[in-house]
Amino acid sequence: MEINHSPAQNTEVFPGTVMDLPGGGVVTSSFQDLINWARSNSLWPLTFATSCCGIEMMSTASAKYDFSRFGFEVARATPRQADVIIIAGTIVNKMAPVLKRLYDQMADPKYVIAMGACAISGGPFFYNTYSVVKGADHIIPVDVYIPGCPPRPEALLHALITLQEKIKSGLTREQIREQSTNPLV
Amino acid sequence: MDMELLKAYFSALEPLASFEEGGEWLMVQVPAENWKNIAPKLITERNFDFLFCVTCVDFKTHLTMVYHLRSMQTDETVVIKIQLNRDQPEVATVSDIWRTAEFHEREAFEMFGVQFTGHPDLRKLILPDDFEGFPMRKDFEDPINMIKL
Amino acid sequence: MYSETTIVTPEASQQPLQEGQLVINVGPQHPATHGVLHLVITLEGETIIKIEPHLGYIHRSIEKMSESLTYRQFIYVTSRMDYLSAHINNLACAMCVEKGMQLEVPERAQVIRILMSELTRIASHELWIGAMAMDLGAFTPFFYTFRERETINDIMEQTCGARLTMNYMVPGGVMYDLHPEFVARVKSFVAQFKSKVSELEDLVTDNIIFRNRTVGVGVLSKEDAISYGCTGPVARASGVDGDIRKRFPYSGYEKLQFEQCLDTAGDSFARYIVRIREMYQSIHIIEQLIDAIPDGDFQAKTKAVIKLPKGEFYTRVETARGELGVYIVSEGATTPYRIKYRSPGFSNLSALNHMAKGSKIGDLMATMGTLDLVIPDIDR
């Protein structure tokens, strides 16, 4: 079995190479691949919904477009237990320090998804507003962006799967930062 | 017509009141100093017990406070306008008569700078505490945040 | 620019704390506040002494922004204001522009507008039941109510093109004609609703825990409701009969037969029951109209660039939360001079301190849940 990085053909396989030996088989893998595989399949989101995109996030959590089949079951309101923060909604100047504080309270490794046009760049509130932050990545670093106003639940699911792919291939900001500081990894 | 009866009532109540034409409801212009005396009589004599909209409009030479009042029993509606000086806009509060005015007047204070004398708690409601300026005024400029089209 | 958030001290809240009192913050990020509402609560033990709402965490300066948008463009920003009754918000703005232009809307457009508004009202109440039950600890009704809500979203998507913020109302009528499958799908939805909502009632209405937590909690009297400016189901549960669809009918509601749902108790359970009965009344309205949609134009002819004459115009509609008023002051240009949105949540929230004083923290969740607040509607 080989690790296949292209999303179009990726079937869910356990990362590693199997060697058939008399008396059984042995799987060899690297720690990093194993840890990435385990982390990506159980990301716990923090429910951070400020406006309309929050309703589409709730739709994704409910029975029709269930996102707990991908491992996002435990969506709690406390940042201490969360892995990924889904910024669903507009960020305004008064809310910006609150968002930064929540992000700082999350434990490493943490990932960020910016959902909706408002979180990407200010959205429909870009021109002539005095109180909107024009994009959540002015405040915290973002891994995945989802366009739409609001994006469909299927788009949010696609983004969650893309984040999982990104983690498995070691390309999130978190992992790149770790690799550059820790040469043994 | 009911509008004529209301006009007569207001002329009797406040001799300095003037009326505006056009629009579906009676629009009464009242001087700012006498608003405190007129307001309690509106609720006891004519039963205007539902204050449903408190606005401020910035015409570039002056500010105007607009109060929309309605009676729950008879469905009569009247619009009261008060012209204020732009440099020192002050008017009496009505939050002890209609409790809904408490939040609405706080919003008019932070957006336009109108001082409501007698208000129990006049602070910023929606804007951040360290915001400078009155954003809904026509001469508000914010080159950092506002990107003009 | 992004300074630290200020910690609220007793001096800042303008009343010195006495011995044994404690100030806690609920929100802005909290699962039960339905958006970003920050409540500063002064407690003595578990009893609430005072509640102070801090707003502005989603203030997107919609009123200032609308002063530079044309009369066709500003309507769609209001879908984002109270996103659970998006059609009804757009309808209020379109009606205000039509009032200024003195434009007649064709009958087919009026009937389509009522159908979309009533479907939106049902969807909003369904989501509210799910979210409120979740606040009180019951997770199952959330999934049951989203089942009906998804059916409505699919119907909307087929005709309007979007699920949540469908920009469908224009000055003069509606943007597209109904999809050919619309009537059949709505009829099957009505049948589904009638058979499935009894499950929901068994789960929630007759549940002894739910009743104990909501009966007698957060009482609002009739005079207080009028004085605080409360409208919608909050006021109707206290006995105030101010439904805009009955008092000042618009867009064809005067030809329909439906009842206003009133209650006199004024507590949280009364507000819940009023909304359940309103859903049944909305189904009744849909049934009256769905077989008799008149033929004709779905949009009246208007000029490409709309200019309102000098003056001021006010329209009001009944959203799922209460009375939404749109007040436009126009100076004759292509953009409005001043727009003010009289939002229902703003006045409903001002009654929260009065209703929750003296009760416990657990009761606060029931009271706040039944007020049905959508915070972007309050902050605009």
Image (tube, grey):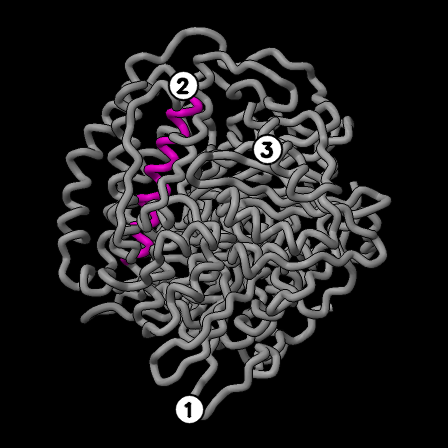
Mark nearer the viewer, 1 or 3 = 3
Instruction: Give the total number of marks visible in the rendering.
Output: 3
Q: Is residue C128 magenta?
A: yes
Q: Amino acid at mark 3?
A: Leu
Pointer 3: what residue?
B6
Mark nearer the viewer, 2 or 1 = 1
Q: Amino acid at mark 2?
A: Val
Q: Amino acid at mark 1?
A: Gly
- Quadrant for the N terminus of chain C, please: bottom right
Residue farthest to the front, as pictured:
B12
Pointer 1: what residue?
C20
Q: CA distance from mark 1 to mark 3?
A: 54 Å
Q: Are marks 2 and 3 on the same chain?
A: no
Residue closest to the eye, C51 or B82? B82
Q: Quadrant of residue A40?
A: bottom left
Pointer 2: what residue?
C111
**Image point (75%, 47%), residue name:** B31
**Image point (46%, 17%), residue name:** C109
Which residues lie in the magenta part? C111-133
Label 1 crowd (10 A; few <14 / some 14-19 / many >=20): few
The circle drawn on residue C98 is: none
Residue A127 in view, yes or no: no
Residue A115, above or below B27: below
Q: Is residue A20 magenta?
A: no
Label 2 crowd (10 A; few <14 / some 14-19 / many >=20): many
Q: Are marks 1 and 3 on the same chain?
A: no
In the rendered image, residue C42, in percent from the top left (x then y), is placed at 45, 78
Q: CA distance from mark 2 to mark 1?
A: 59 Å
Residue closest to the eye, C72 or C53? C53
